[in-house]
Amino acid sequence: MPRALVIAGCLSGEKDDAGVAALVDELAAAVGADMTLRARTGGRPVGRALPDVLAELRSGGVRRALVVTTHVADGRLQRAAASAVRDAAPGFESLGLAPPLLAGERDHAAVAAALDEALPVRPGRVVALAGHRGPECEAALAGIEGALRERGRGDVLVGAPERLVARLEGSAPKVLLGPFLIALGHHARREVLGELARSLSADVWPHALAELSAIRRLVISHAMSSL
């Protein structure tokens, strides 16, 4: 019986995202997917919404599916994905939803270790990583910053864009700005690497978390636990 893998998230800018392309290929191989589809859970109205994709699979006779989101935290969009999966479940024999990237303290430690390796200390430089707004997301970002401090990385700030601007205001360090997002989509490219970088006069780290192999392994581990 075929199994479908649905990659769900804000997919507006992922066409040329090598990290997400690698993640999709590795996820499909790990879960034994016979087909892979993408769905939108938020952001700009580009692409099909998750409920529509699940309805299409059900009407096409697919009875086993796994949804993996590109969400960092268990916030509004992850809850919306969970609701869509619950609503569609009666039409499937097996329909699962993987946890978001930061589902527990071990995830914080693993992600902090990956960032520590990818962004080594440079004298006189502050690394600022911008993620999504919202209480759950911002709490998760604070947890990552705390995990990085435990590794001796007090030079890394992680937070929503407005909070990063406020924390860096009045100081004049060299700032390296990057997105704390799994995908290098519209929000990352335009708002973080564009508008925010200009406001901070920052150099940019134009990469998504999915480009880091340790992050992909963590996402795959969450997916496998949901089968």
Image: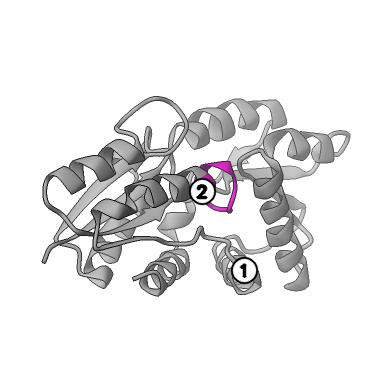
Residue 97 among those drawn in magenta: no
- Residue 115, by quadrant, is bottom right
The tag on residue 78 is 2
Image coloring type: one colour
- Residue 153, by quadrant, is bottom right
Residue nearer the viewer, 203 or 215:
215
The tag on residue 84 is none
Q: Is residue 71 visible?
A: yes
Check the image and report above or below for 211 versus 1.
above
Judging from the image, what secondary structure is the residue with disc 1 in? loop
Residue nearer the viewer, 66 or 140:
66
- Residue under label 1: 104
Check the image and report above or below for 141 versus 112.
above
Q: Residues within 10 Å of mark 2 (few under 14, many from 20)?
A: many
Q: Please report the bounds of the magenta region as a residue range.
A: 71-79
Could you tell me residue 25's position as x and y percent?
Answer: 25, 60
Report the residue at 14% width, 61% height from top. 34
Report the residue at 41% width, 51% height from top. 86
Residue type beneath disc 1: Gly
Check the image and report above or below for 141 versus 2.
above
Report the residue at 66% width, 36% height from top. 202
Residue type beneath disc 2: Gln
Could you tell me residue 49's position as x and y percent?
Answer: 34, 35
Report the residue at 76% width, 63% height from top. 146
Judging from the image, what secondary structure is the residue with disc 2 in? helix
Question: Is 219 positioned to the left or the right of 73 in the image?
Answer: left
Q: How many marks?
A: 2
